[in-house]
Image (cartoon, grey):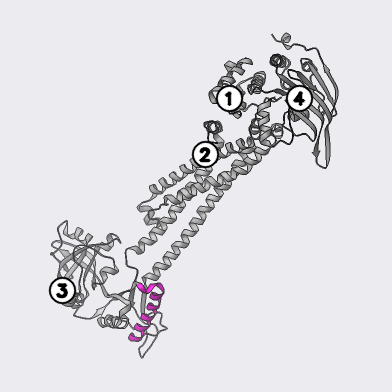
Amino acid sequence: MIQIENLHKSYKMGSNSLHVLKGINFSVKEGELVAIMGSSGSGKSTLLNILGMLDELDEGSYDLDGVPIKNLNETKAANYRNKFLGFVFQSFNLINYKNAMENVALPLYYQRVGRKERQEKALKYLDQVGLKEWADHLPSELSGGQKQRVAIARAMAAEPKVLLADEPTGALDSTTSYEVMDLIQKINDQGNTILIVTHEEDIAHMCKRIVHLKDGVILEDKKVDQVRADQYVQ
Amino acid sequence: MFSRDIWKEIFEAIQKNKLRTFLTGFTVALGIFIFVTLFGMGNGLNNTFMKFFGNDATNIFRIYPSTTTIPYGGYKAKRQIEFKNDDLDDIFKEFGPLVQYLTPRIRRGGVVTYKDKSDNYATYGVGPGMQFAEKTIIMKGRYINSMDVREKSKYAVIGRMVEKDIFKGEDALGKYIDVAGSAFRVIGVFQDDGGDNEERNIFIPFTTRQLIEGNNDRVDQITLAFNESIGYSGAMRFQKQLDRYIRKKKLISPQDPRGIFIENVADNLKRNQDFAAVLKIIISGIAFAVIISGIIGISNIMVFVVKERTKEIGIRKAMGATPRTITSTILLESVFITAIFGFIGMILGIVVLNFIQGKTLEDDYFITKPAIDSGMAIFVTILLVICGTLAAYVPARKAAKIKPIVALRDE
């Protein structure tokens, strides 16, 4: 599904440049649930941003579902993001004047799905994250966990090839974190490919594979026995 | 681009961001409103100027005699110049082809009586030409003609208000009124666009007036209409020639600032029109400055709006919005708001112009029928919409180009 070879990325900081990713080789198969771990500054978020086409690579190659991701203009990048990727952010990033259902329907709007179908699909995915009754609530009326579940529903609504989550539990307490992870595991069980950036060990162990990043290189890439989150959820 | 979905997004954004919408809309509406009212007032001022002169003919010289201040030709200073009937004949002989008509005027005030009703009116001894000079409109009967002048007939043409005041609704035609002890037969009733006061005048043949006053041949003032075909510069030249001719005939020093005075209505009109035009240019300038400041206002608000929405734009881009969709949504929103509120401002301005027009404004501020032609109002509204859109385009384009990663980092 994802194929990365010899990936380099540096940022210009004034006169000196900061080499963030120093030759990453990495691939993800369909249906995997991968945690990308590392301390801050290890380059894990940069990696995720490049995977998400939110940022461009300097050197190396990146294939997504057999499509080379290279020299994309903004419009093309937008179309690929829309077609291939779903995003979950640490700070949820819901549009505050749209209710839960409208937020979930947003990627479908950019896929030019008709209004009625959009609403049906949005409600279906809201139901999957257990928030159907909250469809017409604004983000400000939802708790942190609920917001993240709406965000996950939104990411899933477009039926992406890969779901990218940047510290999805970073702003949540541990009980809520496990609820969210439980949801992510269930989505993975359905065969969806998911990448999670996290710095929390327990969250990482709820994935099936952990990639350790340090100073821009992969330190360790291992399969782990998945800890199911539902045992912590009442 | 004009799908129902885009409009739904726009309406939603407008509805959910009322303060922002209001601020933008208010700037636009206020700009257009001020423009329309200012421009309308400018037109109103212009109308007043036109009105002052519109009710009299403009191809007119009025020649007034006065006292000399410089001794000349054997005469001492402080000599009162007088015009006589033969002066008119001489002027006509000298300048015949340039003259359309020539009429003397002898003004007298006095009591005018019909039966038991009487009042004070100005009575003018005139020739037939005066009808054209004053643009007098005959309602019934006729004006003084040359036969009346020759025969020194005791005929009077009275104003509409005179008939109304002393005839009390009776038909004045053929009735006799008493003017300074003589009975005059009313042969005509007139109206005048100059207003009620001009309709409280009475015209009689100037020869009749001279007859009453001891059969003299004195004339107060001479009114001369020149052929309009000589044009403005021709009129200015004619005025100089006429001045020279009369001074020579009446032995007045060419250097004497007094002695005679020729009032050139065409010149007055032109000066006033020039003044009104300058005034209008200034007012239009201010009005356009208001529009420009409105445009700058919108630009500022749009920069702020886009900045405020940076994060939202980042989210939308992460969800797959293309730069084009982002730009067009922001632009359509801006066009929609400026168009609606511009229209509101325009209508308000027109309503206010209609509301304030009236006697007070006319008499105290010299603004008559303030109005803006709708083409101008619509042009300016569209101008503001276009400029507002251009002003929105730059920040919108910039926002659409922001990498979503940068927009999302903006916490």
SS class, disc 1: helix
Residues tagged 2 and 4 counted as in contact (Cβ below 8 A): no
Determine the chain carrying the residue at label 1. A
Q: Is residue B369 left or right of residue A231?
A: left
Q: What amino acid is at disc 1?
A: Glu
- The residue that label 1 is drawn on is A102
Residue A65: x percent and y percent? 72, 25
Q: Residue at x 73, y 8 (%)?
A: A231
Badge 2 amino acid: Phe
Q: Which residue is mark 3?
A: B153
Q: Is residue B387 magenta?
A: no
User: Badge 2 is on which residue?
Assistant: B336
Q: CA distance from mark 2 to mark 1?
A: 23 Å
Q: Earlier in the sequence, mark 4 or mark 1?
A: 4
Same chain, labels 2 and 1: no
- CA gap between label 2 and label 4 equals 44 Å
